């Protein structure tokens, strides 16, 4: 059983909230503050309940203390997003006597943000001594960082047994409810999954997990060309995973056939000379791609076919773009899936993080989805049916 933040009494307690503030940056400027905004309901609730809030996150992959990866811009953005009502104190470190003193002196309404956890190699190593130091700062542990829940690090798993109370935040609850309950455990039928991206090998476990559950699996993106080639269809210069991955694609097609689950591949393509803006863009009449061309998006007939499948569904989960969506002339397939999922208000629509989340955000459809996951790798592992360490650590008997 997992408790949630609103099940707890937080008045006067030190509340350690593991958030995911690993936001994209351009130098020291935050280019997308979605992950910070998603954490606000949990942070605000802890403050409203009288908790002394300590926030902790990593940023990037530093090799040690690195001013370029300080959480200072995040602290400034957080003050702004909290409406200027709360002072956010950025510590010089994430552990040590100075940090303990700042936490002890916290006044009501103030927030402490620990400096980048990954400035200490012990964080990713899930070092016990480091875990205990973090735990010593808190009376209550709350994890709201789904994006790191698949990592067994000190702040996501190691420190939890050393804190008296544990719970999940609102964002974590939403991720568990949508990806777990509404997709994997009890999806409304018909249930359609859409997978794209570049590699079959990245999605093998997801395909194996979903095939027995879905009513149809739609495959686009570069991974579709591996499946087509495995069937003996010419795919020109398209990106294909050769060798044992072709055999694996053939095996997955056989599994789908045995389960009587439609594994739906593109029936036409948008092709070009390369994945760049100056490339030509042509439609193919069928599945065959000319020898001097590469597939870069699904074609209009495939878009119509996928759209119909989505509109007939009651649950849709999507992970991976249908083409090189960063280039406008190869973005129509990805856009068509986003539009179909937006218009079909009957269905529960879930975006499984990563590039799909970036695409719907960029195209302006994110707020029309039932749920857009904040975790790329975490959502994939969740859909594979794996037990995520960050969620497992929250369980109580």
Image: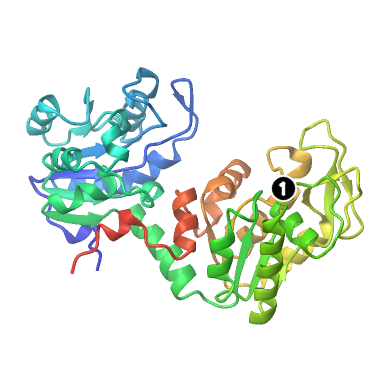
From the viewer's side, name the closer residue of 89 and 218.
218
From the viewer's side, name the closer residue of 28 and 44.
28
Q: Residue at x 20, y 51 (%)?
A: 160
Regarding mark 1 in the picture, which secondary structure is present there? loop
Residue 395 position in % (x across, y down): 24, 63
- Badge 1 density bin: few <14, some 14–19, many ≥20, Cα 10 Å: many
- Can the viewer see residue 376? yes
State the quadrant of the C terminus: bottom left
In the visual, does 88 lie left or right of 34? left
Q: Residue at x 89, y 57 (%)?
A: 288
Q: Residue at x 70, y 63 (%)?
A: 247
In the visual, does 365 lie left or right of 57? right
The residue identified by callout 1 is 323
From the viewer's side, name the closer residue of 293 and 282.
293
Q: Is residue 92 above or below residue 354?
A: above
Q: Is residue 63 above or below residue 297?
A: above
Colour convention of the picture: rainbow
Q: Residue at x 84, y 34 (%)?
A: 279
Residue 9 position in % (x across, y down): 12, 55
- Can the viewer see residue 47? no
Q: Quadrant of residue 196?
A: bottom right
Residue 6 position in % (x across, y down): 21, 58
From the viewer's side, name the closer residue of 219 and 40.
219
Residue 14 position in % (x across, y down): 12, 43
In the visual, does 303 lie left or right of 177? right
Q: Is residue 201 above or below residue 180?
A: above
């Amino acid at each position: 059983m997992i408790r949630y933040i609103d099940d707890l009494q937080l008045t006067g307690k030190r509340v350690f909230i593991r958030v995911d503030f690993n936001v994209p940056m351009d130098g020291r400027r935050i280019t997308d503050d979605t992950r910070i905004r998603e954490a606000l309901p949990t942070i605000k609730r802890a403050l409203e309940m009288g908790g002394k809030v300590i926030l902790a996150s990593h940023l990037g992959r530093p090799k040690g203390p690195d001013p370029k990866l300080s959480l200072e811009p995040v602290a400034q953005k957080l003050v702004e997003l909290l409406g200027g009502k709360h002072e956010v104190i950025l510590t010089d470190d994430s552990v040590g006597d100075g940090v303990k003193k700042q936490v002890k002196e916290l006044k009501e309404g103030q927030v402490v943000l620990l400096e980048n956890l990954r400035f200490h190699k012990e964080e990713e190593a899930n070092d016990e001594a480091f875990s205990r130091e973090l735990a010593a700062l808190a009376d209550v542990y709350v994890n709201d960082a789904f994006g790191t829940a698949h990592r067994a690090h000190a702040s996501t798993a190691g420190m939890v047994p050393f804190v008296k109370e544990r719970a999940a935040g609102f964002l974590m609850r939403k991720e568990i409810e949508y990806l777990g309950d509404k997709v994997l455990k009890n999806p409304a039928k018909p249930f359609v999954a859409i997978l794209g991206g570049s590699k079959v090998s990245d999605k093998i476990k997801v395909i194996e997990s979903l095939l027995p559950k879905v009513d149809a699996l739609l495959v686009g993106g570069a991974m579709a060309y591996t499946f087509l080639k495995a069937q003996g269809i010419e795919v020109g210069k398209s990106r294909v995973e050769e060798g044992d991955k072709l055999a694996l694609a053939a095996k997955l097609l056989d599994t789908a056939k045995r389960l009587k689950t439609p594994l739906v591949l593109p029936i036409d393509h948008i092709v070009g000379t390369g994945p760049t803006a100056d490339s030509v863009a042509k439609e193919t009449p069928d599945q065959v791609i000319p020898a001097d061309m590469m597939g870069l998006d699904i074609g209009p007939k495939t878009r119509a076919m996928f759209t119909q499948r989505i509109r007939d569904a009651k649950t849709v989960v999507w992970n991976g773009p249908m083409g090189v969506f960063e280039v406008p002339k190869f973005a129509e397939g990805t856009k068509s899936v986003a539009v179909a999922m937006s218009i079909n208000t009957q269905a529960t629509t879930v975006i499984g993080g990563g590039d799909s989340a970036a695409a719907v955000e960029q195209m302006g459809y994110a707020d029309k989805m039932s749920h857009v996951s904040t975790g790329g790798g975490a959502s994939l592992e969740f859909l594979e049916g794996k037990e995520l360490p960050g969620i497992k650590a929250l369980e109580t008997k």
